[in-house]
Amino acid sequence: MQWDQKNLKLLGLGHIELKILESIIEPKNPTEISKLTGEIRTSINYNLKKLIERGLVERIKTGRRYLYVSQSPAEIRRKLQNMSDLFGPHSEGIRIKTNKEDEFIVHVGANEIVPAFIRIALEIKNERVKAIQHHKSFTDLLSVASKEQIETFNEAIKKNKIIVDGMLNESAYKNYYQKIKNNPEDFFLQIKTLEGRMADYSVFPDDKFDFHSEIWIFKTTTLIINWKEKVGIEVTNANITNLLREMFEYVKESSRKIDHNKMMRELKDSLDERIN
């Protein structure tokens, strides 16, 4: 019987709880569980109680003693699916709060990721935001977000005086043009809202960061998004955010600066000519 470690982690289980679950696929008593996991009985009893409260472990009375058995992997997956269904299409995601300041949120689906993306842009002002985005990721974004959502995000960037410290691949603008030249009316507004942002852009070789994912580093929060798979991770953790910020600066040192607004004006002008 195979356990889905990804699903179990989404439940926020500790490593001892995971070891216990794996040891009681068949009913066992606390002494047997202790031997299998290498954990002391006090720890076993404490964690069994937590797992029972979560509905992940069942206690079975046999004579004068109790045996413990885990829910099946299929049942745990069903519970996770039920949790997801309760969140609905405008969910704030699956939250894991590790302490008062730190929080990790898993967003699944464009209906979760895009609102989170916009929410962060609307909440901050006068900050420098760092972003790494290959053109593949931007193309995926255009396919899942509405024109209005993209406009709202970009207008928030400009209105709140957010400086975008971005890195793109070298042929990004060329690929944007190739993508939208056959349907300029559909993309003209998105391109127009990208112009006029306070931007400090650089480019990296096309074979680097060649993924359908991107990363946005705000002051206290980081967003890692895969628009193709429609999965995003929102990390509010100073240690992780600072690490990623320093990694960004290290990579940027070897990148080449470009004039983002000039490139966007040229792209917009070429689209304007096609429309008119």
Image (cartoon, rainbow, N blue to C red):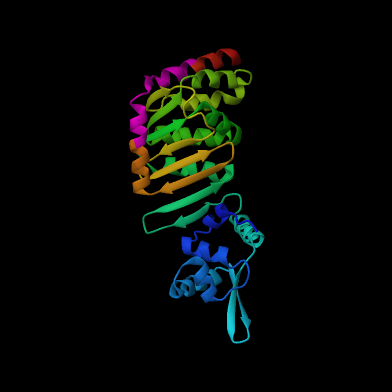
The residue lying at 50 percent from left, 22 percent from top is 172
Farthest residue toward the front?
Answer: 35
Q: Is residue 101 magenta?
A: no
Q: Quadrant of the C terminus?
A: top right
Residue 249 visible in the snapshot: yes
> Residue 75 is drawn in which quadrant?
bottom right
- Above or below 204: residue 85: below
- Above or below 249: residue 124: below
Q: Nearer the viewer, residue 109 or 148?
A: 109
Q: In which quarter of the image is the N terminus?
A: bottom right
Please state the extent of the stretch shown in magenta in the rendering: 247-266
- Above or below 186: residue 27: below
Q: Percent from the top left, x then y, of residue 243?
A: 35, 41
The secondary structure that dominates the magenta segment is helix
Q: Percent from the top left, x then y, of residue 89?
A: 61, 49
Q: Percent from the top left, x then y, of residue 76?
A: 62, 61
The residue lying at 55 percent from left, 28 percent from top is 136
Q: Nearer the viewer, residue 17 or 137?
A: 17
- Above or below 244: residue 201: above
The answer to whether 21 appears left or right of 155 in the picture is right
The answer to whether 100 appears left or right of 10 in the picture is left
